Amino acid sequence: MPIIIDVSEAPQCLRFTLIGPWPTIGEQRDLRVRLVNHQLLTSTTRALIDLRLVDSVPAYTDANAIVAAASKDGGLPRIRAYLVGSAVQFGFARQLKTAAAAATHIEIFSSEEEALVWLWNTDAHS
């Protein structure tokens, strides 16, 4: 699977690194279900999602379907920092942010250090 997961700080925080081809909705769902079932992904988990090594991103119009599928499974962290390395990745992450529920906190970064500072300092209740 083209997703590497660092669970060393789970369930407080998960780090997802996407490598190569974009994972299918089914692959993403299977991963979320496993993480939830093992109590590594909870309603309070924060996530750093690194898109810098992905070959390409889906069409921007696919963002709504991706978020809807993940929301149905109940496996989307409310606080997410996307780490991007290109304008196309930034644009797609922006679409994911737009498609997210109102109570979700999402920011997009090109610096891992800045993403981590934001991730750990964002108030889950604001």
Image (cartoon, rainbow, N blue to C red):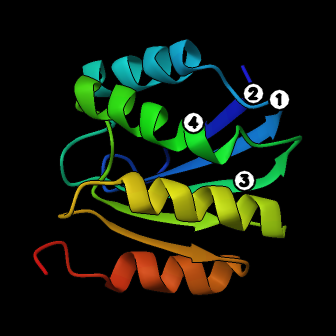
Q: Relative to the observer, which residue lies in front, 44 or 99?
A: 99
**Residue marked by disc 4:** 62
Q: CA distance from mark 2 to mark 1?
A: 7 Å
Instruction: Give the amino acid at mark 4.
Output: Asp
**Residue marked by disc 3:** 51
Whether residue 88 is situated above or below residue 31 in the rendered picture: below
On the picture, is 7 further left or further right than 4?
left
Q: CA distance from mark 4 to mark 3?
A: 16 Å
| Location of the N terminus (image quadrant) | top right
At a point 64% along the width and 83% down the height, the residue shown is 113
Mark number for residue 21?
A: 1
Q: CA distance from mark 2 to mark 3?
A: 11 Å
- Circle 4 or circle 1, nearest the eye: 4
Instruction: Give the amino acid at mark 2.
Output: Pro
Answer yes or no: is residue 34 visible.
yes
On the picture, is 41 further left or further right than 21?
left
Q: Relative to the observer, which residue lies in front, 104 or 40?
A: 104
Crowding at dot 1, Cα within 10 Å, few <14 / some 14-19 / many 20+, comes out as some
Instruction: Give the amino acid at mark 3.
Output: Leu
Circle 1: element type: loop
**Residue marked by disc 2:** 2
Q: CA distance from mark 2 to mark 4?
A: 18 Å
| Location of the C terminus (image quadrant) | bottom left
On the picture, is 112 further left or further right than 107?
right
